[in-house]
Amino acid sequence: MKILITGICGFAGSTLARELRVHREGVQIVGIDNLSRRGSEENFRSLRAEGFDVRRGDVRELPDLKQFGAPDWLIDAAANPSVLAGVDGKTAPAELLDHNLVGTIPMLETCREWRIPFTLLSTSRVYSIPGLRSLRLATTADAFTLEARQTQAGISAGGITESFSTEPPVSLYGASKRCAELLALEYGETFDFPIWINRCGVLAGAGQFGKADQGIFSFWIHSWLQRQPLRYLGFGGHGRQVRDCLHPSDIAPLLWRQFDEGMGAGKPKVINVAGGMTRTMSLAQLSTWCAAATGPHQVSRDGGDRAFDLPWVVLDSTLAEMTWNFSPKIPLEAILREILDHARARPDWLDLSR
């Protein structure tokens, strides 16, 4: 069988390409990437050296998607993944939407023509910013924690569920991914081919690009080891904001189960895929970990709030566990150690990839 991965030279795409091949023999994995992200050229060279058929291409161009012939499955890992995209002066809003939303149409057209499954790697950023900012939080040690009683729907003891509000504002990035989700679901329903949407929490691991708004765990550890400037931003400048962490390798078994299911009658099309409560950490706690592992480093404070900052985002993946037997295997400590080992081996990585 043949799997086409778009955005294959990104962190998630390249990790999944390698991991999917490990789980099943005789799989041909091909992919395209526009190489717009710094660091992607490194993955381009290494994937080719490992025998993957990887080519430069644009998801907005049907000929680029069809150059490998008909695949059996298309996995969309291509996106501008920054919540600041479209508002930071580096990417125009129209450019963000062109890549993240308009670019979804040729991929869906490819799946419609060849009647193959489409898997979209989506994001926790589709959930409403006002809703997430209104969560009732306490402070335990150096981290925000979720209080037991919440007044809004979509919150469980395990975190944010799929029924949490997706009403705007969600950021332009979040809106582009939410619109892509809706478009994919409509295509699948109208033209009768499988659609699977996996809303990922923070993905982390060795080789992730060193940008704070895309991979905070990797950015923080690399920067700490290099003794580069770090700041706690917003929420009083204490670094108490919390995220959950997941290694993308843990997604591969789930993807295979979704592919084998075919149309998946009765299975949820949209699920959260994340590290959950057992893999959470605040920035202050991450700093404590870094100090113990590599020595002290000064972190400055800026308590001013920014438009898209959120104090606590932990996705509840219970639905994925119940319906797809999804269960992360790689613990948080192992993920952090993997990043640190990579940072020690590649002291040039921050400059290379940001």
Image (cartoon, rainbow, N blue to C red):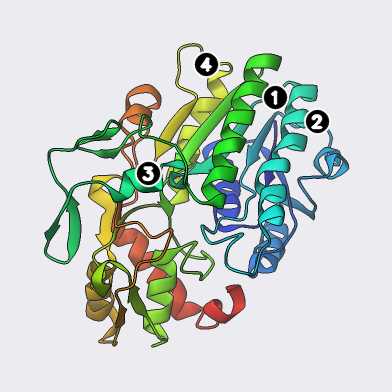
Q: Is residue 127 left or right of residue 57?
A: left
| Residue at image coords 66%, 19% | 193
- First along the sequence among labels 1 and 2: 2
Separation of marks 4 and 1 at Cα, in angstroms: 13 Å
Asked which secondary structure carries label 3, the reply is loop
Q: Is residue 10 left or right of residue 99?
A: left
Residue at the spot of label 1: 116
Q: Tag on residue 274? A: 3
Q: Is residue 314 above or below residue 1?
A: below
Position of residue 57 measured from the top left corner of the image (x, y, whole percent): 80, 52
Disc 4 or 3, which lies upstream in sequence? 4
- Please report whichever mark, 3 or 2, sits nearer to the chain's N-terminal start: 2
The residue that mark 4 highlights is: 264
Q: CA distance from mark 3 to mark 2?
A: 31 Å
> Which residue corresponds to mark 2?
70
> Of residues 323 and 36, which is closer to you in this image?
36
What's the residue type where badge 1 is placed? Ile
Secondary structure category for the residue under label 2: loop
Q: Indicate the position of residue 309 as horizontal and vertical percent values.
A: 38, 60
